[in-house]
C-alpha cells in the first residue's frame, strides 16, 4: 500500500471516529505478552495492536512523542484503544507533529482489517 493510500485510510478512519484521546505524560513502550482484549490496555495509556480484535503485539503510549517511528507497531496496527484518564489523543501522520492529524476521544476503541499508522502524538483537551 502506498504512503498516500495509508495516509488517506488513516485520515478517513480518524475522521469517522472523531480522533484519538489519551491520558498522562509518559513514554511509549511495548507489552511483553500478546493481549487478547482492549481491556488489557492499562488505564492512562493509548494502546495499539498489530492484529484485529486486539490481538498480536501491543504497544502503548502515555505521553507526548515527537517520533513514534522507532516503535514498530505504531507503524502498522489494526486495533486501538484510548484508555486515557482525562485527555484526548491527537495523532499526526508525520514526526514532530506534522502532516495530517486527528483526535481520538478518551474511551474510544476500534478494530478492523485496515492497517494504520501514526508518527507522533500529543495529549489535548485535558479536563
Image (tube, rainbow, N blue to C red):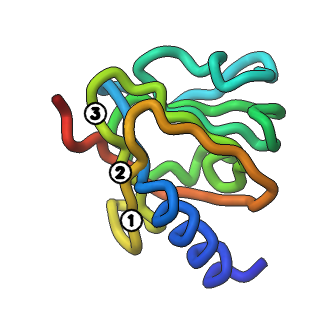
Q: Position of residue 58 (x, y in %)?
A: 70, 31
Q: Residues within 10 Å of mark 3 (few under 14, many from 20)?
A: many
Task: Report how far apart the C-alphas of labels 1 and 2 lie in the structure.
Answer: 7 Å
Q: Pointers 1 and 2 in contact (CB under 8 A)?
A: yes
Q: Position of residue 31 (x, y in %)?
A: 68, 22
Task: Report how far apart the C-alphas of labels 3 and 2 lie in the structure.
Answer: 9 Å
Residue with the mark numbered 3: 87
Badge 3 or badge 1: first in the primary sequence: 3
Residue nearer the viewer, 39 or 7: 39
Task: Report how far apart the C-alphas of labels 3 and 1 lie in the structure.
Answer: 16 Å
Compared with 37, 121 (above or below) is below
Compared with 82, 76 (above or below) is below
Q: Is residue 66 visible?
A: no
Q: Give the residue at x 34% y 27%.
A: 23
Which quadrant holds the C terminus? top left
Q: Secondary structure at mark 3?
A: loop
> Disc number at residue 123?
none
Residue with the mark numbered 2: 90
Residue with the mark numbered 1: 101
Taking 61 as reference, is 109 left or right? right
Q: Position of residue 53 (x, y in %)?
A: 79, 36
Which quadrant holds the N terminus? bottom right
Q: Secondary structure at mark 1?
A: strand
Q: Pointers 3 and 1 in contact (CB under 8 A)?
A: no
Q: Position of residue 46 (x, y in %)?
A: 49, 33
Amino acid at each position: 500500500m502506498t504512503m498516500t493510500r495509508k495516509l488517506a485510510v488513516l485520515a478517513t478512519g480518524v475522521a469517522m471516529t472523531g480522533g484519538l484521546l489519551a491520558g498522562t505524560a509518559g513514554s511509549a513502550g511495548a507489552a511483553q505478552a500478546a493481549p487478547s482484549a482492549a481491556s488489557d490496555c492499562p488505564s492512562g495509556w493509548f494502546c495499539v495492536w498489530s492484529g484485529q480484535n486486539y490481538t498480536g503485539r501491543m504497544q502503548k503510549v502515555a505521553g507526548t512523542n515527537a517520533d513514534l517511528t522507532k516503535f514498530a507497531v505504531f507503524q502498522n496496527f489494526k486495533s486501538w484503544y484510548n484508555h486515557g484518564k482525562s485527555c484526548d489523543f491527537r495523532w499526526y501522520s508525520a514526526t514532530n507533529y506534522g502532516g495530517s492529524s486527528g483526535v481520538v476521544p478518551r474511551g474510544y476503541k476500534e478494530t478492523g482489517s485496515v492497517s494504520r499508522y501514526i508518527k507522533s502524538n500529543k495529549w489535548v483537551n485535558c479536563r
